[in-house]
Image (cartoon, rainbow, N blue to C red):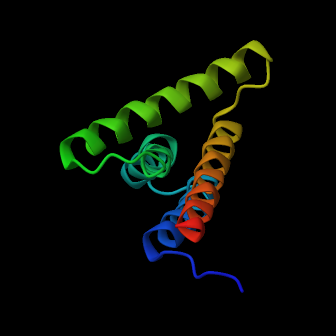
Amino acid sequence: MIAAINRPTAVLGVAAVVLSLVTLIGLPTPLQAVAAIAVLILLPGQALARLTPVTDFALTALLVLALGLAALTAVSTAMFYLAVWSWQACVVAMGVITILACVARARQEAVS
């Protein structure tokens, strides 16, 4: 029997897909900046922070920013050194990282 996915995990995964597509399609400039920040930093950071057992709100908020920026730095640096960097590829890569972290979280939830 397949266990149901927790609602926050599902929402985070769907948000990553939708905001990645919206960012790639294009929006007016202020909305584009907000969507890009969400896709590039906040969503991956939140998905990765959910994999940790931290329950303190302040520490979780710090982890979201730190993990999001660390993942973005690692992806951007790797793409730069491989000479394949583009902002579109970076958005897609960060969306994929978010989805993979959501899948890992769903597997954690299924086990517990």
As displayed, is residue 57 above or below residue 14?
Answer: above
Q: Residue at x 50, y 67 (%)?
A: 9
As displayed, is residue 22 above or below residue 69?
Answer: below
Q: Quadrant of residue 81?
A: top right
Q: Quadrant of residue 93?
A: top right
Q: Residue furthest bottom?
A: 1
Q: Which of 55 and 20 is in front in this view?
A: 55
Question: In the image, residue 70 lies at what x, y percent?
Answer: 49, 27
Q: Which residue is drawn at 79% across and 17% down?
A: 83
Q: In this view, does 83 lie to the left or right of 19?
A: right
Total number of numbered discs in the rendering: 0
Question: In the image, residue 53 lies at what x, y percent?
Answer: 38, 48
Q: In this view, does 39 lie to the left or right of 77?
A: left
As displayed, is residue 37 above or below residue 22?
Answer: above
Question: In the image, residue 107 lies at what x, y percent?
Answer: 62, 63
Q: Nearer the viewer, residue 42 or 4?
A: 4
Q: In which quarter of the image is the N terminus?
A: bottom right
Q: Residue at x 54, y 31 (%)?
A: 72
Q: Residue furthest top?
A: 81
Q: Which residue lies furthest to the front in this view?
A: 112
Question: In the image, residue 101 lies at what x, y percent?
Answer: 59, 51
Q: Which residue is drawn at 24% across and 39% down?
A: 59
Q: Is residue 61 left or right of residue 39?
A: left
Q: In which quarter of the image is residue 75?
A: top right
